[in-house]
Image: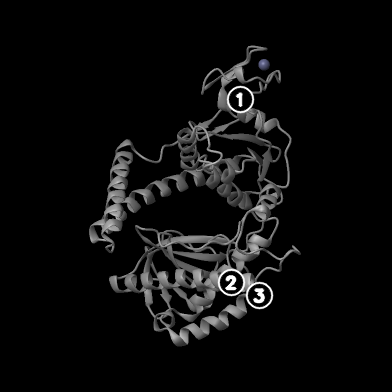
Amino acid sequence: MEADTGRRYRLYPTGEQAQQLTSWGHTCRWLYNTALEQRQFAWRQRKVTLGYSAQCAFLTEARRELDWVAGLPAQSGQQVLRHLDQAYRNWWDPRHPAGPPTRKRKSSRLSVPFPGQAISVRRLNRRWGAVKLPKIGEVKFRWSRSLGGVIRNAVVSFDGTAWHVGFGIHAGITKPKTHARPDTVVGVDRGVTIALAMSDERLWNRTFTSPGQERTLARLKSKAGRQETARRQLGAATSNRARRVRAQIARIEAKVRHRRGDFVAWAANRLCGRYAIVKIERLDIHAMTTTAKGTIEEPGINVRQKAGLNRAILDKGWGLFHTALDNRARFTGTRIGRVPAAYTSQRCNHCGFTHRNNRESQAVFWCRSCGYQAHADVNAAINIRDAAEVAPPYTGRAVRDRNRKASCRPPTQRRPQPALETGISRIL
Ligand SMILES: [Zn+2]
């Protein structure tokens, strides 16, 4: 019974509980990084792949020797090792887009995983619930929506502003075989100025930061930069003031992140509800947004402009939108089609004439051959709707990942690996 969907609730730990969870979060990060190093070391030195059970034995040893590791619930530690194991399996799976597992940075989101058996959930009243965690006891959370199934696992996390608890849920979702409106097709063009343009002439856009927030963010970031330089020069520890500035930055960034997440979920829900087939351009966003800086021998050109475009692409949440579509499609029976991205913005969907001068401006498309005029993004979206699909989606990434420099090579035989029986949710 694997988790097939997720639920996330705002968690309200007491001061003491929050302190405990914070320290566990750091222990989990340490454990993940140490286990990763151990696997890399074992491979480099002896060409041995350490598995989950071998690493669990090391964990037991570490718990005996180090008090602060023993403080973390044993099941959480095991769950961290399972996550690392899954990260390796994803990397080895040619159909999965993941690259090699990387270290968790100190600035990354704090999280403490728990298996389903270690926790229990109780509803207190209409608005509140409580989750019972090992060694901590009950922690209240805001019951903002129904669970909708059986809890398989939980992750408590802190994103810089608030605590959340996420549950992996087995809801018994089976993808509907047919969509409620069969044979409906839409093409979606993702853009930098207009976030989403549809072939049915709808344009959806939203900005996620207000001008005031952008100013505040720029001011705070330069302040944090100055503080960090000063700290390095003095060789001192991070000051409480610097911590406060970082917390302020994190609060604003979390707001922006939430708005972006809300927008992509809203858009994905609309599109999947209305259309049986949603077609988007097949874009490798990772490759598109890698830095333009280049190397000393081959410096990139237009580095500043490229950096700005990267920011804009990531700001509009192109990759997130893709994930949200895939997620939502499981409930509606929608099929997500990928089409080649070349020339969609230059081709006239009326006569097929392709030329870059057809693009009159950012917003206006004006065909030089037949005189057809339309919104440039809508014209592109119609081209996407009419284009032939390409499959499978992840081949390009898997091949590139194999060539990527990595500290630990995958086994040469790439057989599909059996899924872990423990039911780790990929959703969380
Ligand atoms: Zn034309």
Residue 46: mark: 3
Residue 41: mark: 2
Query: Quick one: quadrant of the N terminus?
Result: bottom right
Residue sitting at the far bottom: 64
- Tell me the kind of residue under disc 1: Asn
Residue 379: mark: 1
Callout 3 secondary element: helix
The residue nearer to you, when weighing 123 against 64, is 64
- Tell me the kind of residue under disc 3: Arg
Of mark 2 and mark 3, the one earlier in the sequence is 2
- Tell me the kind of residue under disc 2: Phe
| Number of the front mark, 3 or 1 | 3
Q: Is residue 180 above or below residue 305?
A: below
Quadrant position of residue 156: bottom left
Q: Residue at x 48, y 83 (%)?
A: 62
Q: Is residue 194 above or below residue 147?
A: above
At which x and y percent is residue 126? Answer: 38, 64
Mark 2 to mark 3 CA distance (whole Å): 8 Å
At which x and y percent is residue 326? Answer: 61, 49
Residue at mark 2: C-beta within 8 A of ligand 1: no
The residue nearer to you, when weighing 353 against 424, is 353
Q: Residues within 10 Å of mark 3 (few under 14, many from 20)?
A: few
Q: Residues within 10 Å of mark 1 (few under 14, many from 20)?
A: many
